[in-house]
Image (tube, rainbow, N blue to C red):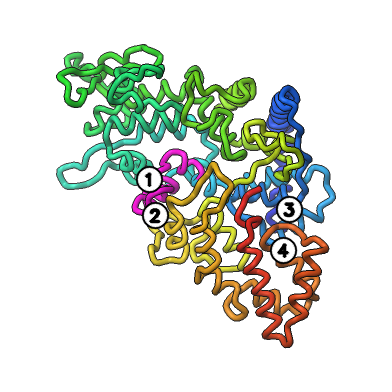
Amino acid sequence: MRSLWMVLIAILLDCIHVSSSSMAVAEEKTEPRQLSRKIDAIVEAKCAENSVMLADACSDAEFARRVYLDLLGRIPRVAEVRRFLDDSDEAKREKLIDELIERPAFAAHFASVLRSGLMPRTQENPELYHLGLSLEDWLRPRIKQDLGYDQIVHELLTVPLGEQDSSGALPADANQHFGAIAWYQINDLKAENLAGAASRQLLGLKLECAQCHDHPFDKWSQDQFWQTAAFFSRLNMRQNDAEMKGQRPAQESSDLQLVSIKLPNEDRKIAAHFLSGQPLGDSTGDPRAAFSLWLTSSENPYFARATANRIWKQFFGRGIVDPVDDFRPDNPPSHPELLDVLSDALVQSDFDLTILIRSIMLSKTYQRTSAVTDASQLTAAHFARMPERPMTAEQLWDSLVVATGYHDPIPLTHRSLAGMDNSSARIQFLTSFLGESQPDSPQISIVHSLKLLHGPFVDRLTSSNGGPMVVAISSSPLLNDDEKIETLYLATLSRRPTSEERLLVSQHLDSASDSAGHAKAIGDVLWALLNSTEFMLNH
């Protein structure tokens, strides 16, 4: 009932907002639909050019599961998917997208998405996982506030890193920016590491490949790498608010110093230059402010394209330029016009990521089935069908929680570094998978599967006496066996079972001789569904 009332209240508030500013809302809602049509036109034209057959539209069940995983990081609950499947409104898909983006869980999930892009090493090393949680804490409220991605990146690149004072106290705003400091920590506060991370993660450029020497076939030189690193050469300086806003504090001209960095093992310094070739020159403040303003500028030829490309990959498993951090002349985009359209839309919307998200999800391209109906669809770069994507460890955990009825003591929207309990089931589960995920491959590793098949967590939650979902379904006097089977499939695969599946599961339940055996049979079915490839993939 609570979710129903929340939806009714949201609708009422939307109506009030529409009545007060109908034109503004109409324009805001029209833009994603217009952009979605451009997406489809470009993708369909490319497929026609290459004689690629487009896949059919996905079913409502496929769509619901896909959207919940992509926006909230979990599969839908039984009541949620049942309500969506039974809804006859032709606009229900668009309404579901809008509803989920407004939920607090969206901000929590996309904080995790952005963290994985900004700190990929937190997905590989369990010892670095806490740094990822710290950055998510910092990102979450900014996503809730609908800050543009350019503003978020500017804050990250200019976060105060002032030293402690003589009493050991941190700067007054240290707590406000504590989570962002994790990005600097994971890069060891080294100018060269930060320059490499910023160029790769925010511009899609592997600038660090030129760190030691010029590469004969690469556009970027060693000097250009160190010219970028020079912007991070004053990290040990004390900073104030004026400096972080790019304002020059009142100082004597004699305080001006050339922003430069000494090359390792060489007796020379390199002055800070933007990748456009323009020098920074002398400065008294933190040069990161100037670097950030250049990087997030709408005139920057790399930032908007790299951001749009990463968002696209989040929903299709691969970028228009792939890998997403490898923009170079000999690795061209699969759909150049599409990348231009998406990056232009991002700039025009002041880097509002939800504009791209809504537009992509409203497109026919996103709403195609993952089922292969023609061999031409196997080439992922055509985007002729929705590719199968393995769940991340976080998605898998949160989906298991939903499917089994497990009570997670720390809900998604309240997770933080301070609340991290290394002994909790969640942390042990997540850290056990770090380093094993293969985001570019739909295959689930053997180790991955064995952990689920024989893990104590799944065994306990699918038992007849310890599994909340098993107990609830098996003991319900209001459900007959057919309805129990349907509930199991909705809880795990977010769809109703086929007639063949109904028959097979029904025969298994009929084999039980008593209520205890019936409950065990329910648990067996739940266990099998959780360990199916269909459950473990976002498709």
Residue shown at 49% from the left, 49% from the top: 437
Position of residue 157 in the picture relative to residue 499 (left or right):
left
Q: Which residue is mark 3?
A: 8
For label 3, the SS is: helix
Among the two numbered marks 3 and 2 on one chain, the one whose residue lies closer to the N terminus: 3
Amino acid type of the residue that numbered disc 4 sits on in the rendered structure: Tyr
Are the residues at dot 1 and dot 4 in contact (C-beta closer than 8 Å)? no
How far apart marks 3 and 2 lie (CA) works out to 34 Å
Are the residues at dot 1 and dot 2 in contact (C-beta closer than 8 Å)? yes
Q: Which residue is mark 4?
A: 489
Q: Which residue is mark 1?
A: 179
Q: Nearer the viewer, residue 454 or 165?
A: 454
Among the two numbered marks 1 and 2 on one chain, the one whose residue lies closer to the N terminus: 1
Q: Which residue is mark 2?
A: 417
* Mark in front: 3 vs 2: 2
Among the two numbered marks 3 and 1 on one chain, the one whose residue lies closer to the N terminus: 3
Amino acid type of the residue that numbered disc 3 sits on in the rendered structure: Leu
Tag count in the figure? Answer: 4
How far apart marks 4 and 3 lie (CA) works out to 28 Å
Q: Nearer the viewer, residue 174 or 117?
A: 117
Amino acid type of the residue that numbered disc 1 sits on in the rendered structure: Gly
